[in-house]
Image (cartoon, rainbow, N blue to C red):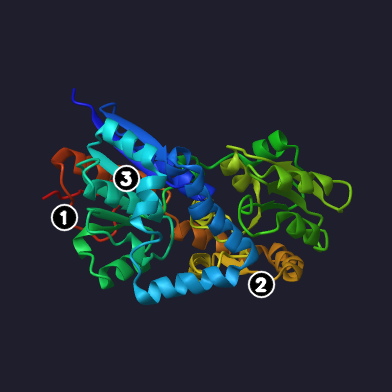
Amino acid sequence: MKIRRVAILTLSVGAGHLRAAEAVHRAVYAGGDDVDARTIDLLKHSSRWFLAVYVTTYWQMLRRAPWMWRWLFIRRQKKMHRKTAPWWIFRRGCRAALEQLKTLAPHLVIATEVGAAEFAAMARRGGWFDAPIIAVQTDFYTEPPWVQPEIDVYCVASEEAKSQLISWGVSSNRVVTCGIPVDSAFALRFDRAELFQALGLDAGRPVVLVMGGGMGPAPLDQIVERLAFCRQPLQVLAVAGNNRELRARLEALRGRVMLDLHVFGWTDKIPELMAVSNLLITKPGGVTAAEALAVGLPMVLTHPIPGPEELHLRYLAERAVAVEAKSLNEIPGVVSALLADGAALKRMTQQAREAARPDAAFAVAQIARAVLEKGTYIDLLASPTLRPDESIFVM
């Protein structure tokens, strides 16, 4: 049996890109035991100066000068800039990842973040590997730097993103609308009574999940403080991720706010936490939104990252699966109104499930296996929207 090697590249400037890469990784393995898939996070194979220049600068800009990031994003779109950074920054800053790719000699490379896609294109152009590249996007809209001549297939989240790529010169038969890859656990239907018991929650009181600000600009502790002013007696699940300082601030709120507050750090129980909740408060990250859609969880969106997440907010609001809270002070009123309107929540749940693509990771994996079979790109002659049970035509 011939083992085909697959390199899944990501750049974990946010947790969502890594979660998407892991979902694709598992889906590729689920298709059979003839694949050796390895996920490579460029940040774990980069120099300290690369982290300072490419990552720390980005986060500092979001926290201290979000207007500047919005300006850069809009300028990149208008001027059709095809780079997030000069090639030499990736080539020198991620040299260890290049060496790892060369040693692995993959038969296929999958990139789940725009910088990782640029890196993959540069590495193939420079002779570090010779294999097709699949770009997997985790935003509902796309950006010009994704457009690289070395990329063979684009797996996008929406028809809007597909239209953008085509308008920028990408052949339509190289773009497939798959959705945003999420773990298959988000498609499960949990027994909520069991979840209430396991998490020590009261089944007679509404549950609000607060997450999405572990590394970003959303002040989760201040959001939780505002929830104490809601009309309902809430149970709040707050997820701080790997942010220890944020978790400490959340823990300090216990006993100070009139809420039944449960605080989590990093956890692999997000599918269960979403399944037990009535409402999610989060910034509109693409992967988090896709997970909530798969669960059918209505969203209150706040503190979007300027540029891409503002577009996400519009995309989700237009589909009536989310409501915006423009400020911290709006959150109590928005949450109270939604929780008091059971019919509205039910409609949002239904619309979320209709908009969901919980099979996206398996759609990407199916494309990956088709590419591995032929060693070339896919010419999609069937429906523009790929489902895992549909045929793929390989030229």
Of all residues shown, which one is farthest toward the right? 255
Of all residues shown, which one is farthest toward the bottom? 78
Q: Residue at point 34% right, 50% down?
A: 119
Q: Nearer the N terminus, badge 3 or badge 1?
A: 3
- Local SS, label 2: loop
**Quick check: can you spot residue 317?**
no
| Mark-to-mark CA distance, 2 and 1 | 43 Å
Q: Nearer the viewer, mark 3 or mark 2?
A: 3
Relative to 260, does residue 334 appear above or below in the rendering? below
| Residue 12 as seen in the image, left or right of residue 166 | right
* Residue that label 3 marks: 110
Q: Nearer the viewer, mark 3 or mark 1?
A: 3
Relative to 294, does residue 311 appear above or below in the rendering? below
Q: Nearer the N terminus, badge 2 or badge 1?
A: 2
Under mark 3, the amino acid is Ile
Label 3 neighbourhood size at 10 Å, few (<14), some (14-19), many (20+)? many
- Local SS, label 3: strand
* Residue that label 2 marks: 326
Quadrant for the N terminus, please. Answer: top left
Under mark 2, the amino acid is Lys
**Residues at circles 3 and 1 in contact by the CB criterion of under 8 Å:** no
Q: Could you tell me residue 192's position as x and y percent?
A: 64, 42
Q: Could you tell me residue 42's position as x and y percent?
A: 42, 43
| Mark-to-mark CA distance, 3 and 2 | 36 Å
* Residue that label 1 marks: 379
Under mark 1, the amino acid is Asp
- Local SS, label 1: loop
